[in-house]
Amino acid sequence: MHAPRTRVQRRPVHGVLLLDKPLGLSSNDALQKAKWLLRAEKAGHTGTLDPLATGVLPLCFGAATKFSQLQLDAAKTYEAIALLGATTTTGDAEGDVVQRCDVDPAQITPERLGAVQQQFTGPIRQVPPMHSALKKDGKALYEYARAGVTVEREARDVVIHALKLTLVQTDQAQPAIKIIVTCSKGTYIRTLGEDIGAALGCGAHLTFLRRIDTGGLGVERCVTLAQLEAMPEAERLASVEPPESLLAQHMRVTLDGENAARFLSGVRRRGNWPDASAVAVFGENPPALLGVGHIVGGELVPDRLLSPLEIQQILESSPHSASMAHSGILEKL
């Protein structure tokens, strides 16, 4: 008989783990592994990263899942390598080569690269690749692609905020383009690589893709699954950043006890504040995140709120705040 499997005792974890996703792992598999290592009750990721891509994948736990949409909508920065002279069925190294073309690196002049760089900077239109999770009639495009079916896709508007193209040599001495791009949500870097290859007249496919920033959260702040696994329990929990780390671009408003309690109950507050579309609202005593809102005409309107239980759990998990967990705003609710 097999020994019974030990059940993992789940616990409330609130915050953001900035994961450096490894190559070959889906975003969901990475999330499930991190969730298991942290023994977290509730978790979600902020938009998928291809299995063939590495880099910044913010994982939201508990109360932080309420703000995950902010990262979905945020601009993202990628580093990629597009190998010139070959197009593939998938736009990356996973697919079969469908066309080859000889490339003379001397023809890929800085002037030509500069012109292509300009062509793909700003608002552009992209046709989503067949090998993507985008749905058509309730089915992901990659499911059609695996069945050998190509379906009509409408071009979508995306924005390339910044683009830098550099000619490089691969290990096999083949010419390639190093791409550093900051783009809006919905941008397919594989498609961008293919389109750049087409504009250069030789075709291209991605051999490397790494997300180095999303919404101001850089890869230098990330932890790998291997590092997380090697950590003692307390250190793992300490690597989870507080939910407000997702709100760095928000205007900050701090409310006193009475106003904090009312705001947390969903009641609008009046004050001498300028209009703002994105506001992170904190209590004063204890200094805790209450939620997000917006200000119009001096009125602070609640949008997404933490629950009193979530606030209490966050305070109790923070050593210096534990003694304040049962004071202030929570007693007024």
Image: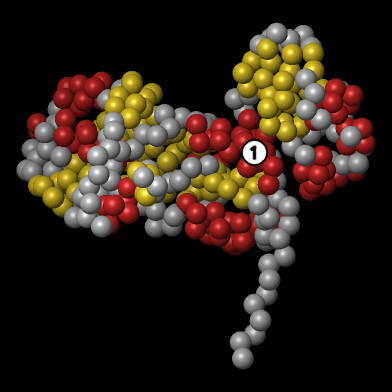
Marks counted in the figure total: 1
Question: Does residue 243 appear in the picture of this structure?
Answer: yes
Disc 1: CA contacts within 10 A as few (<14), some (14-19) or many (>=20): some
Secondary structure under tag 1 reads helix
**How has the structure been colored for display?**
secondary structure
Q: Amino acid at mark 1?
A: Lys
Q: Is residue 228 left or right of residue 142?
A: right
Q: Nearer the viewer, residue 326 or 264?
A: 264
Residue placed furthest toward the bottom: 1
Residue found 36% across the figure and 45% down from its top: 137
Q: Nearer the viewer, residue 232 or 119?
A: 119
Q: Is residue 91 left or right of residue 263?
A: left
Q: Nearer the viewer, residue 284 or 83?
A: 284
Q: Residue 244 location, x and y as percent? A: 67, 34
Q: Residue 219 location, x and y as percent? A: 49, 41
Screen quadrant of the N terminus: bottom right
Asked where in the image residue 281 lies, by quadrant, the reply is: top right
Q: Is residue 9 above or below residue 203?
A: below
Q: Residue 142 location, x and y as percent? A: 32, 51
Q: Residue 10 location, x and y as percent? A: 71, 60
Q: Is residue 124 above or below residue 79?
A: above
Question: Does residue 81 appear in the picture of this structure?
Answer: no
Residue placed furthest toward the front: 137
Q: Is residue 172 left or right of residue 181?
A: left
Q: Is residue 202 left or right of residue 261?
A: left
Residue holding disc 1:
66
Screen quadrant of the C terminus: top right
Residue found 25% across the figure and 57% down from its top: 147
Asked where in the image residue 315 lies, by quadrant, the reply is: top right
Residue found 69% across the figure and 42% down from its top: 63
Q: Is residue 46 above or below residue 33?
A: above
Residue found 80% across the figure and 23% down from its top: 267
